[in-house]
């Protein structure tokens, strides 16, 4: 397994405009894509060479499942606002080496499903899941562009070029409630795919390019996110 993307719900007081401004100010290029899901969740995206960041908001009105409501209102419910999406590496067996649950939503391609890790939902733990198909990495897009140039491929590559200079996500650390380190979280941490620690406040820490520059940017309190590069 390898990282596909990380999502985090913004705090209640952080508007979409404020979060996009904060991400832009530290040198990240926020995609123009703004996805509105049928359940009232809105997503904005920052794409990197091998993964992407998704920041989410819930409109608080549209009918949705209880887990989404708990995550969106994490400051009052105590739920983790974090989700970590994984994808299978090429050549990996179809069966996953841990218990999973099937999840399908109306916005997904027909016949596809997300596999949620763990035997049952844990509101204090981050949502861990395996996507049916991951995004192509930068190398793959560059190969496609060389073989068949198009404006769409150029656009998809351009949003991965950041003024901050970061390119590839080389590590993810999620801080969750002490009771939220689930068995699935421990298994992933032990495998080295992600690092999940307990702490007093939720946090996503993204590490880029093996942190060769030894620099960091902290976007709290606008969004619980730290960049190390």
Image (cartoon, helix red, strand yellow):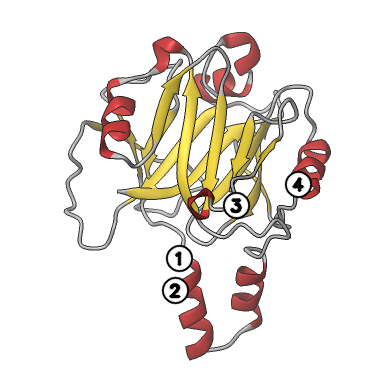
Residue ID for mark 1: 136
User: Distance from label 4 to label 1 (Cα)?
Assistant: 25 Å
Q: Residue at x 44, y 74 (%)?
A: 140
Mark number for residue 158? Answer: none
Mark number for residue 26? Answer: 4
Q: Residue at x 68, y 32 (%)?
A: 57
- Return the x and y of residue 74 as percentages of the image width and height: 60, 17
Circle nearer the N terminus (3, 1)? 1
Contact (CB < 8 A) between labels 1 and 2? yes
Residue ID for mark 3: 213
Circle nearer the N terminus (4, 1)? 4
Q: Nearer the viewer, mark 3 or mark 4?
A: 3
Q: Is residue 131 visible?
A: no
Q: Nearer the viewer, mark 4 or mark 1?
A: 4
User: Distance from label 1 to label 2 (Cα)?
Assistant: 6 Å
- Return the x and y of residue 136 as percentages of the image width and height: 45, 65
Circle nearer the N terminus (3, 4)? 4
Q: Secondary structure at mark 4?
A: loop
Mark number for residue 140? Answer: 2
User: Distance from label 3 to label 1 (Cα)?
Assistant: 26 Å
- Return the x and y of residue 206 as percentages of the image width and height: 54, 42
């Amino acid at each position: 397994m390898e990282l596909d993307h990380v999502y985090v719900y913004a705090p209640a007081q952080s508007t979409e405009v404020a979060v996009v401004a904060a991400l832009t100010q530290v040198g990240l290029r926020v995609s123009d894509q703004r996805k509105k899901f049928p359940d009232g969740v809105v997503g904005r995206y920052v794409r990197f060479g091998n993964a992407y960041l998704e920041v989410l908001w819930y409109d608080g009105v549209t009918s949705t499942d209880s887990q989404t409501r708990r995550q969106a209102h994490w400051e009052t419910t105590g739920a983790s606002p974090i989700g970590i999406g994984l994808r299978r590496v090429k050549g990996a067996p179809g069966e996953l080496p841990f218990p999973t649950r099937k999840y399908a939503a109306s916005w997904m391609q027909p016949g596809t499903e997300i596999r949620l890790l763990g035997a049952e939902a844990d509101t204090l733990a981050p949502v861990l899941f395996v996507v049916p198909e991951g995004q192509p990495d930068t190398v793959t897009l560059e190969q496609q562009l060389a073989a068949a140039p198009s404006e769409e491929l150029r656009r998809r590559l351009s949003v991965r070029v950041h003024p901050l200079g970061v390119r590839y996500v080389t590590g993810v650390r999620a801080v969750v409630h002490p009771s939220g380190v689930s068995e699935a979280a421990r298994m992933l941490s032990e495998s080295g795919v992600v690092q999940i620690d307990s702490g007093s406040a939720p946090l996503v820490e993204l590490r880029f390019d093996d942190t060769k520059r030894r620099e960091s940017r902290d976007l709290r309190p606008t969004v619980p996110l730290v960049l190390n590069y």
